[in-house]
């Protein structure tokens, strides 16, 4: 069964291991929006590849390895060209012509596969599709035809280990630019490190707009591997040209622009679609991906369980759609779909399941509700009315949007996402800004207060002079003295979080006089520490709103995690300086 997804959500290493463990046969096509690589599998083993670079072809590799000469390659290519429809794949022609030994041909193909995987590893964004119907692959990447009776089955684990080793070496040597993250503002460290605001970069927060990864950054638009109209022509076989054009216009309304990206978070919860209907998989993937959702579509129960588990392991509650039995292809029945759904509910009870069902099968729908599904969505037996078809897909999109948006409001889901974000950062300004963003999701207003010698200096604010939805902006020029009996002094000296109502004089005289007194004087002071010392405080309150439920424990844990991430980054920089 075919499946599709995004590299951001399922790394290529996991994709290859999934294909190997499920013993699939087919062509895996991976694109990063500009280029495409292909890996061909036979019962889970990699048998050939096609590199994105046209100069990286098996013939060139064999010449470079010294297995054949340039003259032998040109001569064989000429023979291929003259053979017309009876032409053989290049390696087959080279072997049968006595130009190369089989073991040398195997080594050349192994090199091509390694190079292809290394190329894909450098792509942080992209899409993949496993096409299980591409058994008759083209000569560009078919090397050992059936008549040679040769099985080139590279051990998947060995290939991955070798490719990862090569990838690490190329990254170390600076040979791979795409996907390399470099620290553009290294912190100079000494053995006896002085954690000043200047050293930590906390005095330059106004330069971080482009550097800080936004938690709600929109998913980039990746052009489909095939023309959308061409795909619809193949999938909507009974529709008229006018109906296909109508459906094409409908799909194009869901673009990845900021205007239409209602969701906007590329690292939010995911959608898993279990179906054999290629139109359903194509349409749902096209619509929801453009809105920023993670989408994985498959017709294989093993893939279904694997991907559901992947989402749950990352702290997400996946929304799983089971297609209607009448649309699940030959051999599918209400009993088989019910069994598959129940099995997933037993193995992953946290998953939210939606059953698509025909309006003509009410008992099946009722049984799904008795089994505990989240919802049953009516779906026609056939797509005979283009308006009704569009209405169905729009409803599915709106239902998914509402569900994921509700899930995003769950604090533990947000906490998990921010933890992942912190792992990608290394500078104090980035980490403090991420803390401020997380705090602002529970509070209406927030400030980053940098610890100076005898005072706190406001650097970044959320919801102070601009709407909270605008994110971090320049804070008013505020300086708070660290008076002996103030809550600010206590938070800095003890490193303990403060969350309560307060009549603190410094709070009222120096802070509320500038930003305004909140409706309730319950405030938060969250310490951000490095090497046991508080280097900043995150201040927050509810502004003009009434207090809402907060999870102070999560905030403290995230702040502690941010401090550990910063300490590790500083230690690495100090070690690098000592070894040079």
Image (cartoon, rainbow, N blue to C red):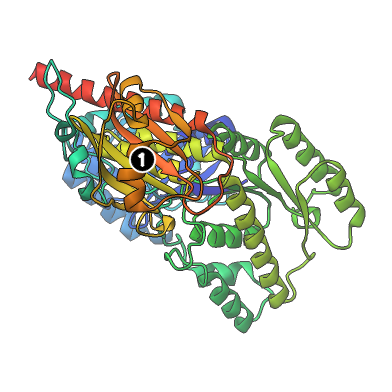
As drawn, which residue projects farthest toward the right? 363
Q: Quadrant of the N terminus?
A: top right
Q: Is residue 235 left or right of residue 534?
A: right
Q: Is residue 463 left or right of residue 191?
A: right
Q: Indicate the quadrant where residue 309 lies.
A: top right
Count up the numbered dots.
Answer: 1
Q: Position of residue 147 (x, y in %)?
A: 49, 41
Determine whether 114 is above or below 38 in the image: above
Q: Residue at x 72, y 36 (%)?
A: 344
Q: Position of residue 417 (x, y in %)?
A: 47, 39
Task: Judge whether residue 429 can be spotted in this image.
Answer: yes
Residue bearing mark 1: 507
Q: Is residue 266 left or right of residue 512?
A: right
Judged from the image, the secondary structure of the residue bearing numbered disc 1 is helix
Q: Position of residue 314 (x, y in %)?
A: 53, 34
Q: Position of residue 170 (x, y in %)?
A: 22, 33
Q: Residue at x 46, y 49 (%)?
A: 518
Q: Quadrant of the C terminus?
A: top left
Q: In this view of the protein, which residue sits in the foreground, 424 or 83? A: 424
Task: Judge whether residue 43 can be spotted in this image.
Answer: no
Q: In this view of the protein, which residue sits in the foreground, 390 or 135? A: 390
């Amino acid at each position: 069964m075919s499946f599709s997804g995004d590299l951001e959500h399922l790394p290529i290493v996991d994709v290859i291991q999934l294909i190997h463990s499920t013993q699939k046969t087919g062509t895996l096509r991976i694109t990063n929006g500009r280029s495409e690589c292909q890996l061909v599998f036979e019962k889970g083993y990699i048998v050939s590849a096609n590199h994105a670079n046209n100069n990286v072809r098996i013939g060139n590799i064999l010449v470079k390895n010294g297995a054949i000469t340039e003259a032998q390659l040109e001569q064989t290519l000429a023979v291929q060209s003259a053979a017309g429809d009876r032409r053989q794949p290049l390696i087959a022609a080279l072997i049968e012509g006595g130009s190369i030994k089989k073991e040398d041909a195997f080594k050349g193909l192994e090199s091509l596969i390694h190079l292809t995987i290394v190329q894909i590893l450098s792509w942080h964004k992209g899409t993949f599709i496993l096409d299980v119907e591409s058994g008759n692959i083209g000569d560009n990447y078919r090397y050992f035809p059936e008549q040679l009776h040769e099985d080139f089955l590279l051990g998947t684990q060995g290939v991955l280990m070798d490719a990862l080793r090569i990838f690490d070496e190329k990254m170390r040597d600076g040979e791979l630019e795409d996907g390399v993250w470099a620290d553009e503002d290294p912190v100079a460290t000494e053995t006896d490190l002085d954690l000043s605001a200047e050293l930590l970069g906390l005095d330059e927060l106004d330069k971080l707009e482009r550097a800080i990864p936004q938690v709600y950054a929109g998913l980039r638009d990746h052009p489909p591997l095939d023309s959308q109209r061409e795909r619809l022509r193949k999938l909507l076989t009974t529709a008229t040209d006018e109906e296909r054009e109508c459906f094409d216009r409908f799909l194009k309304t869901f673009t990845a622009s900021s205007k239409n990206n209602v969701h906007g978070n590329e690292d939010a919860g995911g959608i898993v679609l279990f179906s054999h209907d290629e139109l359903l998989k194509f349409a749902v993937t096209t619509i929801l991906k453009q809105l920023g959702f993670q989408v994985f579509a498959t017709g294989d129960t093993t893939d279904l369980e694997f991907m559901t588990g992947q989402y749950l392991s990352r702290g997400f509650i996946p929304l799983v759609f089971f297609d209607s039995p009448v649309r699940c292809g030959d051999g599918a029945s209400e009993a088989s779909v019910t069994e598959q759904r129940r099995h997933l509910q037993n193995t992953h009870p946290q998953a939210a399941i939606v059953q698509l069902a025909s309006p003509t099968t009410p008992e099946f729908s009722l049984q799904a509700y008795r089994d505990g599904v989240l919802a049953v969505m009516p779906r026609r037996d056939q797509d005979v009315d283009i308006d009704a078809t569009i209405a169905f897909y729009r409803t599915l999109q709106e239902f998914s949007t509402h569900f994921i948006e509700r899930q995003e409001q769950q604090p533990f889901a947000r906490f998990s996402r921010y933890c992942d974000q912190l792992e990608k950062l290394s500078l104090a300004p980035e980490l403090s800004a991420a803390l401020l963003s997380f705090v602002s999701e529970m509070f209406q207003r927030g400030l980053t207060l940098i610890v100076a010698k005898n005072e706190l200096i406001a650097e970044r604010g959320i919801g102070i002079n601009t709407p909270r939805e605008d994110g971090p902006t320049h804070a008013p020029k505020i300086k708070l003295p660290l008076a002996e009996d103030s809550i600010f002094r206590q938070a800095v000296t003890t490193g303990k979080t403060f969350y309560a109502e307060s009549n603190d004089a410094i709070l009222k005289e120096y802070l509320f006089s500038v930003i305004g007194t909140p409706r309730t004087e319950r405030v938060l002071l969250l310490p951000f520490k490095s090497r046991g010392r508080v280097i900043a405080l995150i201040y927050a309150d509810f502004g003009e709103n009434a207090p809402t439920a907060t999870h102070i424990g999560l905030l403290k844990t995230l702040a502690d995690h941010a401090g550990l991430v910063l300490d590790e980054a500083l230690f690495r920089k100090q070690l690098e300086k000592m070894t040079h």
